[in-house]
Image: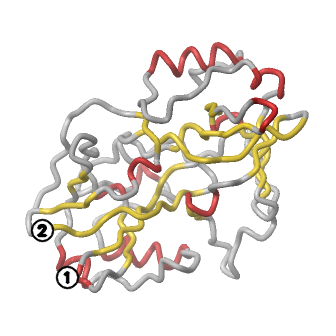
Amino acid sequence: MHFVKIKSEIMNRSIKSLIGFDLKETDGDIGEVVDFYFDDQSWTVRYVIVKTGNWFSGKKVLISPQAFQQPDWENEEIAVNLTQEQIKNSPDIDTEKPVSRQQEEQLNNYYPWVGYWGDVHDAGIFGQMPSDLYYEDVTPPPASTVTDTDLSTENNDQHLHSTEDVDGYNIHAVDGEIGKVVDFIVDDSTWKMKYFVVETGSWLNSKKVLLSTRWIKEVNWENSTVIVNIPIEAVKNSPEFDVTEPVKEAAERMLFTYYGKPIDE
C-alpha cells in the first residue's frame, strides 16, 4: 500500500472541530477522533487518539498525523494509510495514561513513522526524505519557558499533553489574567497548533480572541497557567474570533500587525 498525499487548500481550523471526524481506509472505517496529544516544545500535534469501531471493541489507539491525508472538512473524514489489521497488531498503548518516549519508539518501530525528537536529516518517510508536511524546526519557541519541573517521568521522557486536558487553562497577560483556553487553531498540513482560542473574562463580555502560541512567555503545567507577552489593554480591542470560520492568511497578518508582532520569523 502506498500513501499518496492529496493536494488541497491548507486550512487553519479549530482543533475541536476535528473531534468526531471519521478515519477511513479502503478496508473500512477505523474509528473516530476523540482527542489529540501535542508536544510541549513545538506545540505540534504528534498523535491523534482514535476510538475504534466494533471491529476492535471500541478500543482507543494512537495514530500519528504522518499516516494522514489532509482532512476532508466537507465530509468530516480523514483518509489514512493504515489497515484495521495493522492497528489490531500495533503496540498496546494505554491512552488513559501518560505516553512515554519508550512507548513512542515502540510505535515508530512498528509503523513507518519517523521520530520527531531526533535529527530529521537522518531519516526519511516511507523511503523518502522528510518534508515540511511532518517537520518543523524542533527548537523550542524562543518566547516559551516551561516552568513545571515535573514534566518528566523517571526516564525524563514525558513531554506530551492532551488538548482536552489543556482546555480551561488560565491565560495571563504580562499584567494580569485574560481568560481561559477553549480551543486551539491547527494547521491541517503541518499539525502545528498555531493559536489559542481564548474566552475572555466578564470584563470583556466573554468574547473569543486568538493569541499565537509563538507569544508564549511561560507555561506552568502544574498550575494550569500560560503567560503570553501581551498586555491586557491590547486584548480589550483585539479582533473577535469567529470559531466557525477558518483562519486565513490575511486574517493572520492583520492579527500580528494589530499586536505589533512579526509574522515571519
Quadrant placement of the N terminus:
bottom left
82 shown above or below 147: below
Numbered tag placed on residue 185 in the rendering: none
Kindly indicate whether the residue at mark 2 contacts the one at mark 1 (C-beta within 8 angstroms). yes
Tell me if 5 is positioned left or right of 139 in this view. Answer: left
137 shown above or below 241: below
Identity of the residue drawn at 78% across and 29% down? 230
x and y, in percent, of residue 86 in the image: 21, 77
Tell me which amino acid carries mark 1. Answer: Trp
Q: How many marks?
A: 2
Frontmost residue, 43 versus 2? 43
Element assignment for label 1: helix
x and y, in percent, of residue 53 in the image: 25, 76
Identity of the residue drawn at 38% across and 48% down? 134
56 shown above or below 29: below
Real-space Cα separation, disc 1 to disc 2, in angstroms: 10 Å
Q: Which residue is mark 2?
A: 28
Element assignment for label 2: strand
Tell me which amino acid carries mark 2. Answer: Gly
Numbered tag placed on residue 55 in the rendering: 1
